[in-house]
Image (cartoon, coloured by chain):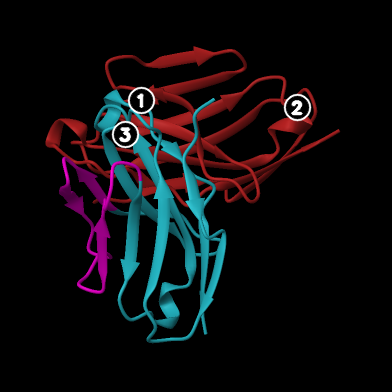
Chain colours: A red, B cyan
Amino acid sequence: QQQVKQSPQSLIVQKGGISIINCAYENTAFDYFPWYQQFPGKGPALLIAIRPDVSEKKEGRFTISFNKSAKQFSLHIMDSQPGDSATYFCAALASGGGADGLTFGKGTHLIIQP
Amino acid sequence: EPEVTQTPSHQVTQMGQEVILRCVPISNHLYFYWYRQILGQKVEFLVSFYNNEISEKSEIFDDQFSVERPDGSNFTLKIRSTKLEDSAMYFCASSLLIGGDGELFFGEGSRLTVL
């Protein structure tokens, strides 16, 4: 129940295209859903996050779509650029339940082809 | 920009040896964490630390692990008797606020290789 399932495992997108990564969860206590970007040799860095009181959040080229009833959320990268090539992790937290630790998905290795 | 720093960047040790991984969190942050990432796998929560005590720990964080904040700046993770399966990248993180209210800042990680 603590799992966050992420797909696809890897994704290749042409420059300028839309990259879409999906995550699903079971634990209804989760109330904070961040996405992290990780470059090789670096730690994860927060990209964008959403709470379940909204269905969409947009920051620049990055958008999170959230479907509470389906228990799914997704990251959309518009106008994908080669510099977006990285591993992306979705995560979830039951902050209202007093949890401190994020539960991560298994990651998506994104390659943007020039 | 303030950052979380970790040392060493890579440590190789023999099975059964003790290892200490060190972290300097961002100076005004109050909450500290250790996560690990086995090669090619997901990032996993180990432990959180606040007000000089463990706030939460996962099932991975067994009696072989301990954390300490020995002074006002360092935050350490000790593995008492390393096992082969402890080989992973260990990430320290810190946040000003807890949970979803505070952005988690990760260090670049310490790669532990147990032979």
Chain letter for the residue marked with disc 2 in the picture: A
How far apart, in angstroms, are the residues tagged by discs 2 and 1?
Answer: 27 Å
In the rendered image, which quarter contains the N terminus of chain B? top right
Residue B28 among those drawn in magenta: no
Q: Residue at x 41, y 73 (%)?
A: B86
Res B24 quadrant in image: top left
Q: Are marks 3 and 1 in contact (CB under 8 Å)?
A: yes
- Indicate which label's residue lies in the foreground, 3 or 2: 2
What amino acid is found at the position of numbered circle 1 in the picture? Answer: Asn
Provide the residue span drawn in magenta: B47-73
Q: Residue furthest right?
A: A114
Residue A67's mark?
1
Q: Which residue is mark 2?
A: A81
The kind of residue on which mark 2 rests is: Gln
User: What residue lies at 33% left-to-right and 60% top-to-bottom?
Assistant: B77
Work out whether mark 3 precedes mark 2 in sequence or the reverse, and give the earlier one: 3
Q: Disc 2 vs disc 1: Cβ atoms closer than 8 Å?
A: no
- Residue at the image position 78 percent from the left and 32 percent from the top: A82
Residue B69, horizontal then vertical, whole percent: 26, 50
Considering the numbered disc 3 on the image, is that residue within a helix, a strand or a loop? loop
